[in-house]
Image (spheres, helix red, strand yellow):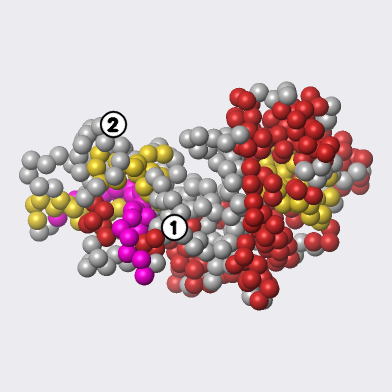
Amino acid sequence: MDDNKNVEEKVSLITRNLQEILGEDRLRPILEERDLVIYWGTATTGKPHVAYFVPMSKIADFLKAGSEVTILFADLHAYLDNMKAPWELLELRTQYYEHVIKAMLESIGVPIEKLKFVRGTDYQLSRKYTLDVYKLSSVVTQHDAKKAGAEVVKQVEHPLLSGLLYPGLQALDEEYLKVDAQFGGIDQRKIFTFAEKYLPALGYAKRIHLMNPMVPGLTGGKMSSSEEESKIDLLDKKEDVKKKLKRAFCEPGNVENNGVLSFVKHVLFPLHGEFVVMRDEKWGGSKTYIEYDELEKDFSDQSVHPGDLKSSVEIALNKLLDPIRKKFQTPEMQKLTRAAYPEPTKQQKGASKGSTAENDEIVPSRLDIRVGRIVSVERHPDADSLYVEKVDLGEAQPRTVVSGEGEKRKVEPLNPPGGSAPGERVFVEGYENGTADDELKPKKKVFEKLQVDFKISDDCTAQWQQKNFMTKLGTITCKSLKGGNIS
């Protein structure tokens, strides 16, 4: 009876907060015999950010359940994924990942001596592994390889062959790391089903696949290393954490795509078993939540204000980040960070040179353009040709905007792709990685100079110099004003 209870406790820890499990029927039989062997891999590309606390908190669950856990620093995968990590920086970035992830685990109280850390190139360049890659290539179709990597490998107009190799290597990792299960995000599902299909073709067993939900970033979409404002870096200063949380999408009563609430659910509750909303006495005082569902209900009912939620998350998050910041304040760690992520010496294609005070090139990435949802429209009390709109930009309160239209002038709104959230960043294709000016100086006329080339194409797509306006979900369009101007 005690053994059965122990197995159920382990199953509960391993599976809690997961979105999906493939091969769950194989989980209990293994646990009745021995502890589970699991691996989680991360490609060593951009800097890890606070969303990495989500898999870290699950790794803590696995260890509490007695599982043996391997963390794979997938350096070779990082290069194969459209060369996101240059070959000459792979070793340095892998060192950075190892230090920062160990610091994260120590921050949340996970004993790292129970973990095994492995680098992909430690075994992926061996003769046996290489032969298995060739064997796999002889049975995998191009269609299946492309489909498997669709959610993970960067999709470009002219895809590289390396992107087709990526899913096969990840599948083989399961065999070469000798695990029972692989853990990852739900975006890995196609690679996991690919592994289940093709590993038996090489005589290897199917593994269990444990999948976390995708946690929204601060702008409401996926938290991404390449979208600066969607994520908080692990080394961000406290004032930067405050600024990014202040701008985070957290609409009153809206629990959908709410990155702040999701962080509480998937990180703070699993780690601490509770969450305290700090609140002034005049609004009812602070309240301790033991169950996440109760917090979500109170937020949905608007008895918890977004401002109080954000400030409470800020306090909890800084407690997690403080020991990581401290570790990386040493000269050795600062040197490693600079070497692994050097400042670009030349402007890369699409990067904003206008993001620095000393460079005045007029490029669209200098503008901070956002998706807005019009909450209300009223006539201006003092001008018949003007309107007063309340616009939701994903902030605590909607902004007030005054606009108007001249006589004989047709006006249409620009439409973001379906599923877009208020506050989501809008960029011009090829200029998605730049940093917007903190303030547009009137004398510089940055907006005015760029607006001259804001046009609607013949297929009703918003463009700047024939390059599309976009969000991460697709292009910005209008209904019918072909050839029109954008203002």
Q: Residue at x 58, y 61 (%)?
A: 341
Please state which of residues 217 and 463 is positioned toward the viewer in this rendering. 463
In this picture, which residue range is highlighted in magenta? 357-380
Q: Quadrant of residue 415?
A: top left
Task: Give the structural element (helix, strand or loop) at label 2.
Answer: loop
From this viewpoint, is residue 19 visible? Answer: no
Q: Quadrant of residue 143?
A: top right
Q: Residue at x 60, y 40 (%)?
A: 152
- Residue bearing mark 1: 347
Q: Residue at x 54, y 54 (%)?
A: 225
Mark 2 crowd level (few <14, some 14–19, many ≥20, 10 Å Cα): few
Q: Horizontal and vertical percent for residue 376?
A: 26, 49
**Quick one: quadrant of the N terminus?**
top right
Please state which of residues 131 and 263 is positioned toward the viewer in this rendering. 131
Is residue 29 shown above or below 443? above
Task: Find residue 459 and name its label.
Answer: 2
| 413 horizontally vs 336: left or right | left
| 219 horizontally vs 189: left or right | left
Residue 212 in magenta?
Answer: no
| 219 horizontally vs 475: left or right | right
Q: Horizontal and vertical percent for residue 170?
A: 71, 39
Task: Give the structural element (helix, strand or loop) at label 1.
Answer: loop
Distance CA(mark 1)–CA(mark 2): 32 Å
Q: Give amino acid for label 1.
A: Gln
Q: Quadrant of residue 315?
A: bottom right
- Please tell me which of labels 1 and 2 falls first in the chain: 1
Q: Horizontal and vertical percent for residue 25?
A: 79, 32
Is residue 88 shown above or below 180? below
Q: Nearer the viewer, mark 1 or mark 2?
A: 1
Q: Give amino acid for label 2.
A: Asp
